Image (cartoon, rainbow, N blue to C red):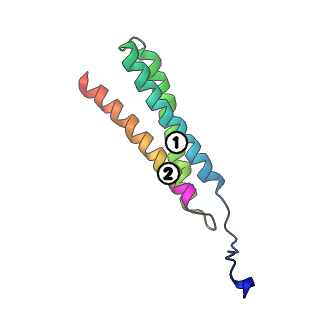
Amino acid sequence: MAIFDKKYRFTSNRHSLKGMMALIFGMISLISFFLAAMISIKNADEMADRMGGAGLFAFIFGMAGLITGIAAVNEPDVFPILPRVGFATALIAVLLWTGVVCAGVLII
C-alpha cells in the first residue's frame, strides 16, 4: 500500500537550547583562539597584553560552553547530536587555551 511507503517518525524529542548555547560558546572560544594565534604570529608578539586579555575572555566562554554542554548532554527527551557537538567544541577550545597557558608558563 502506498500509505505505508512513507516513513514518518513521531517523537517528543526537541532540540536542546542548552546544547545550542554550548555550541555557540565553544565556537566563539575556538574562533577567538585561531584569531588570537594569527594576530600574534603576524605582529610578532607586539600585543601580548591584549591577546592575553582576549585569551582569558575566550577561555571563560569555553568554560561556560563546557559547563552548559555537560548540562545539555544530561537533558532528557532531546536530540543528542547538538549537545554532544557543543560539548566537544567547548572541550577542544578549553584544551587549546590550556595548552597555550601551559606553554607560556614553561617558556617563561
Q: Amino acid at mark 2?
A: Phe
Residue 26, numbered label: 1
For the image, the number of numbered tags is 2
Q: Position of residue 98 (x, y in %)?
A: 37, 36
- Quadrant in which the C terminus is drawn: top left
* Circle 2: element type: helix
Q: Position of residue 61 (x, y in %)?
A: 53, 37
Q: Is residue 76 left or right of residue 105?
A: right
Q: Is residue 108 above or below residue 74?
A: above
Q: Quadrant of residue 40?
A: top left
Residue 87, numbered label: 2
Span shown in magenta = 77-84
Q: Quadrant of residue 81?
A: bottom right
Residue at the image point whose x is 51% and y is 56% from the top: 84
What is the spatial separation of the Cα atoms under label 1 and label 2, in whole angstroms? Answer: 8 Å
Residue 11, numbered label: none
Categorize mark 1 by other alpha carbons within 10 Å: few (<14), some (14-19), many (20+): many
Q: Amino acid at mark 1?
A: Gly
- Quadrant in which the N terminus is drawn: bottom right
Residue at the image point whose x is 47% and y is 34% from the top: 59
Residue sitting farthest toward the front? 2
Q: Is residue 46 left or right of residue 31?
A: left
Q: Is residue 75 magenta?
A: no
* Circle 1: element type: helix
Q: Dots 1 and 2: beta carbons under 8 Å?
A: yes
Residue at the image point whose x is 24% and y is 24% from the top: 107
Q: Position of residue 79 (x, y in %)?
A: 60, 63
**Circle nearer the N terminus (1, 2):** 1
Q: Is residue 18 above or below residue 47?
A: below
